[in-house]
Amino acid sequence: MNDTSITTATGLLEGKVAFVTGAGRGIGAAAARLFAREGARVLLAARTEAQLKAVTEEIGAAGGTADFVRCDLADADSVRAAVDRAVELYGRLDVAFNNGATIQPPGPLDQLSEAEFDRIGAVDLKGPWLAMKAEIAAIRATAGHGAIVNNSSVGSFAANPELPVYGAMKQAVNSLTASAAVTYGREAIRVNAIAPGLTLTEMVDEWERNSPGIIDRATALSPLGRAADPEEIAQAAAWLLSDRASYVTGVVLQVDGGARA
């Protein structure tokens, strides 16, 4: 953790029930820990049970309230069941962070297989769409109002030759976010997205293995001269989900250290 990270709990999400996808590692795990410290009861969702169990136990040991459910983001029944589990456990759903994603093998778009394209689309675009459908229904039926944050990427804003299909799917997530914000704003359901820059996660480690030197190249673009810690990204999501962002909807917030400034 670098010295710019905020670790003191302020009750930002006090009393809320939060659903987090991709919560077994990286930004999702950091978000689950942070949301619990900020007073939320959290349901963690991802595919890998061992990771989910470890993060959930860590939250419990720190005095937070959390549970987990295995979830395949590309499967509608699995996503609905996971969201329903949050309501079953905690009686309501207030906020959701759709963080789960997968990365493509780096390289030109003509070198990506059709099977890989379909896999990336199923998780990175269909996944958030399915999650929003289920979350909006649950918020309507229980809390009556709430907030959703989708995890996008700064790679969605411009040409992305290293990860062209990943970038395209994230740009589509930005569009879905804006459309949902307009559609559900009258119901007091806010929908925003965050667009992280380079963040030190397992996904970025995988990218570095496939494209040696990418971390150094990306860091060089940041005015802050470093990559983000996952909690720094989670902090932005927590604020957007909180009542302190009550007049913010339809935004894709860049959390990139100024890389796109």
Image (cartoon, grey):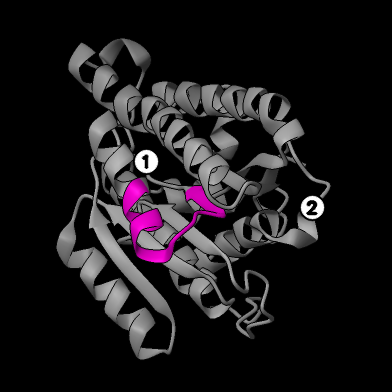
Can the viewer see residue 111?
yes
Q: Which residue is mark 2?
A: 246
Mark whose residue sits in front, 1 or 2: 2
Task: Judge whether 39 appears above or below 220 on screen.
Answer: below
Q: Is residue 59 left or right of residue 168?
A: left
What type is the residue that disc 2 sits on? Ser
What type is the residue that disc 1 sits on? Ala
Q: Which SS class for mark 1?
A: loop
In which quarter of the view is residue 157 placed?
Answer: top right
Give the quarter of the figure containing the C terminus: top right
Counting labels gives 2
The magenta stretch is 84-97
Q: Residue 15: x and y, percent? A: 59, 72
Can the viewer see residue 212?
no
Q: Residue 209: x and y, percent? A: 27, 48
Comparing 133 with 98, the one in front is 133
The label shown at residue 101 is 1
Please say whether residue 134 is one of the residues in the magenta stretch.
Answer: no
Task: Judge whether 260 appears above or below 28 on screen.
Answer: above
